[in-house]
Image (cartoon, grey):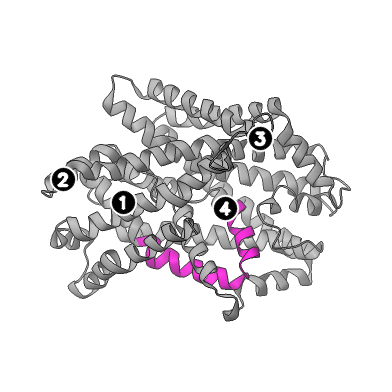
């Protein structure tokens, strides 16, 4: 249970609450949701199982796991590059993820002190822009968020990761269900409109862009290609059923995404806001609703507590692969490895937050530092790692051994091999190609 909640906590994060709603809003609502669900179960679940499988075989950090498992299978140790790219990806992602986590944390207090009360039009946008323009403000909350992440990881796998997720995941569920109920009560007919927007099939809105966007988001949402799940898999015993556990994690992740949509879109429609607002939906559009509804201050505080918790459950998993690597490759203990990793990531995060103000003119290939790191990791490193993982599991490992380990019948395993060898590699290559278009 502790492992499952930790894995679900890694999957449930800003991708579910911040990214999923605005992507659904931009991509036609139900069309995106349907495609996303297919991608989660047909592509995401097998890659998740493959990462856990390899991690459990290696029992080490992702880099040495790939190296050792490849050697055991009679393959080149160059497969360790799959682990290297994954660990580096999680390291880079956390540097800017922590900045966004700091935004969510600060917004708890902005909502609580009535900053959004009575704001309309560009009011919340001005609050957000002023926030981004303050280096000291961003640095303070980035530091607070990174410190919280480091403290949890330093306590270890059992006392830190598992225990925190056993507390935070049920808390997230209670908060989210409460927000959905509240949205249903105060939004009236808009609740039904939101439900129809998300779940009434609209086949005409399914486009190639929506399919590829849903595929990419499924990848990001499940923390695939970051070395995280492989690192988590190294702590698994042989008694854990990988497929049933993965199925539970995917279902929990999907439920949180769906409930997030049902907590957000009724408020959006009830207040005449636009569902296709984009990335600003959470930090710019929703505060307008919170500032002009009955009980909006309390609901705003609860929502951003929920968002911060979700960000934190993912950030601790992003830090784990780097800490595990340092523990195994150096003489550093758990606490020292966490401290070194956290400080370096925190320092890189400063460069990310400065890209919104003092360094906004500093660009790399036409993108500021924050956007460049986001682009390189999500559009290149994650798909590459996932592609390498699924090809390794599908083509490089002895298939009969995998079939027995996964406890699959020959017929079902034939379908598994077809997915891992053909369908998923083609789909991931499509993500890579789309990322450069």
Secondary structure at badge 3 equals loop
Instruction: Kindly identify which numbered label has been placed on residue 51.
Output: 1
Question: Callout 2: few (<14), some (14-19), or many (20+) C-alpha neighbours within 10 Å?
Answer: some
Q: CA distance from mark 1 to mark 4?
A: 26 Å
Secondary structure at badge 2 equals loop
Instruction: Kindly identify which numbered label has been placed on residue 360.
Output: 3
Secondary structure at badge 4 equals helix
- Residue at position x 84%, y 54% from top? 294
**Which circle, 1 or 4, is nearer the viewer?**
1
Residue 111: tell me if it is visible. Answer: no
Give the image location of residue 122, x and y in percent: 84, 49
Of the residues under marks 3 and 2, which one precedes in the sequence? 2
Q: CA distance from mark 1 to mark 2?
A: 18 Å
57 or 36: nearer the eye?
Answer: 36
Secondary structure at badge 1 equals helix
Q: CA distance from mark 4 to mark 2?
A: 44 Å
**Which circle, 3 or 1, is nearer the viewer?**
3
- Check if residue 78 falls in the magenta segment: no
Q: CA distance from mark 3 to mark 2?
A: 43 Å
**Image: magenta residue range:** 17-45
Of the residues under marks 3 and 1, which one precedes in the sequence? 1
Of the residues under marks 1 and 4, which one precedes in the sequence? 1
Is the stretch drawn in magenta largely helix, strand or loop?
Answer: helix
């Amino acid at each position: 249970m502790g492992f499952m909640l930790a894995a679900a906590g890694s999957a449930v994060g800003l991708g579910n609450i911040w990214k999923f709603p605005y992507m659904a809003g931009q991509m036609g609502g139900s069309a995106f949701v349907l495609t996303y669900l297919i991608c989660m179960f047909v592509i995401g679940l097998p890659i998740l199982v493959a990462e856990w499988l390899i991690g459990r075989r290696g029992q080490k950090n992702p880099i040495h796991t790939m190296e050792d498992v490849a050697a055991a299978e009679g393959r080149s140790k160059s497969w360790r590059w799959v682990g290297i790219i994954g660990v580096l990806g999680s390291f880079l992602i956390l540097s800017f993820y922590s900045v966004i986590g700091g935004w969510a944390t600060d917004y708890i207090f902005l909502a609580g002190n009535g900053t959004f009360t009575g704001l309309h039009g560009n009011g919340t946008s001005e609050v957000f822009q002023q926030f981004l323009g303050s280096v000291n403000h961003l640095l303070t909350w980035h530091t607070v968020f990174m410190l919280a992440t480091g403290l949890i990881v330093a306590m270890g796998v059992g006392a830190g990761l598992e225990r925190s997720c056993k507390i935070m995941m049920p808390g997230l569920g209670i908060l989210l269900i409460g927000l959905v109920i509240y949205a249903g009560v105060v939004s009236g007919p808009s609740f039904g409109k939101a439900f129809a927007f998300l779940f009434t099939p609209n086949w005409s809105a399914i486009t190639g862009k929506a399919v590829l966007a849903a595929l990419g988001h499924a990848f990001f949402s499940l923390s695939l290609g970051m070395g995280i799940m492989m690192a988590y898999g190294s702590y698994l015993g042989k008694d854990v059923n990988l497929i049933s556990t993965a199925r539970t994690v995917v279902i929990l992740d999907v439920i949180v995404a769906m409930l997030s949509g049902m907590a957000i879109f009724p408020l959006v429609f009830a207040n005449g806001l636009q569902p296709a607002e984009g990335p600003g939906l959470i930090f710019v559009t929703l505060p307008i609703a919170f500032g002009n509804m009955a009980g909006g201050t309390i609901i705003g505080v609860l929502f951003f507590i929920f968002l911060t918790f979700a960000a934190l459950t993912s950030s601790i998993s992003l830090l784990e692969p780097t800490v595990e690597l340092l523990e195994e490759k150096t003489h550093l203990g758990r606490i020292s490895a966490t401290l070194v990793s956290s400080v370096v990531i925190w320092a890189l995060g400063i460069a990310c937050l400065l890209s919104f103000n003092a360094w906004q003119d500093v660009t790399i290939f036409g993108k500021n530092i924050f956007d460049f790191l986001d682009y390189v990791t999500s559009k290149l490193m994650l798909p590459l790692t996932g592609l390498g993982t699924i090809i390794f599991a599908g083509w490089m490992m002895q298939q009969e051994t995998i079939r027995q380990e996964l406890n699959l019948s020959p017929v079902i395993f034939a379908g598994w091999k077809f997915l891992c060898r053909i369908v998923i590699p083609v789909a991931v290559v499509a993500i890579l190609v789309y990322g450069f278009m």
